[in-house]
Image: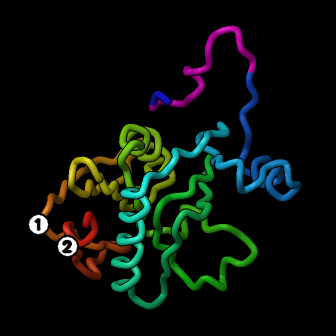
Amino acid sequence: MSAPLRNDTVPSGLEVHRLSVAQYEAMGHAGVLQPEDHVELIEGWLINKITKNPRHRATTRRVRLRLESVLPQGCYLESQEPLVTADSEPEPDAYVVRGAPEGFEQRHPTAADVSLVVEVADTSLERDRIVKARIYAQARIPIYWIVNVEGRRIEVYSRPDGDAYAERTDYVWGATVPVRLDGAVVAELNVSDILG
């Protein structure tokens, strides 16, 4: 898939129908979409999820374990579960939610509930840098990490501004990456521990 999605990527002469978040969720509740369909709603489009290889799975597990071990009270970690924004419902590899899991038994977390989103990128790097970054910036998620498996670094995006992040800082092998939640650094993690 080429990275940009938006309306201008629809081939001329084709009529397509974009979905709202409510329509997408209704399709799931009605059984039209099944878990084995492996899709997510991205900017109103029903998009196939990228197949995950063993390195992606292992790195996601390390991200989850490291983040869970340093989270303060009053928040928890979700992994590969729906996150609702205005026109999308991605399933990030990990994200930190303000509150307790019991508070989300009747609804999915929305961007307003989230302090940090993490995507693990190997084959999905272009999509994560362009499309996912745009979605998370538009949703005003304060911090977005891309764990760049091939590049052996963690790219930290901050200061959402319109449809992009105004700042990017890379943390390379051997460095520590700050875990910043709602403006405060709650811990630092070794990049090498996450990348393995």
Q: The disc labelled 2 sits on which kind of residue?
A: Asn
User: Which residues lie in the magenta part?
Assistant: 3-15
Q: The disc labelled 1 sits on which kind of residue?
A: Gly
Q: Residues within 10 Å of mark 2 (few under 14, many from 20)?
A: some
Question: Residue 126 versus residue 134: which sits nearer the camera?
Answer: 126
Residue 96 seen in render: yes
N-terminal of the pair, mark 2 or mark 1, is 1
Image location of residue 58, percent across then percent down: 39, 65
Q: Quick one: quadrant of the C terminus? A: bottom left
The image shows residue 114, relative to residue 41, as above or below, that is below
Question: What SS does tag 2 mark?
Answer: strand
Compared across the picture, whether 94 is left or right of 36 comes to left
Q: Residue at x 79, y 55 (%)?
A: 28
Image location of residue 182, percent across then percent down: 37, 73
Q: Which mark is residue 158?
A: none
Compared across the picture, whether 89 is left or right of 4 comes to right
Where is residue 141, by image quadrant? bottom left
Q: Which residue appears farthest toward the top when viewing the image?
A: 13
The image shows residue 26, relative to residue 177, as above or below, that is above
Q: Which mark is residue 174?
A: 1
Residue that numbered label 2 is attached to: 190
Where is residue 179, by image quadrant? bottom left
| Spatial separation of the CA atoms under disc 2 and disc 1 | 7 Å
Question: What SS does tag 1 mark?
Answer: loop
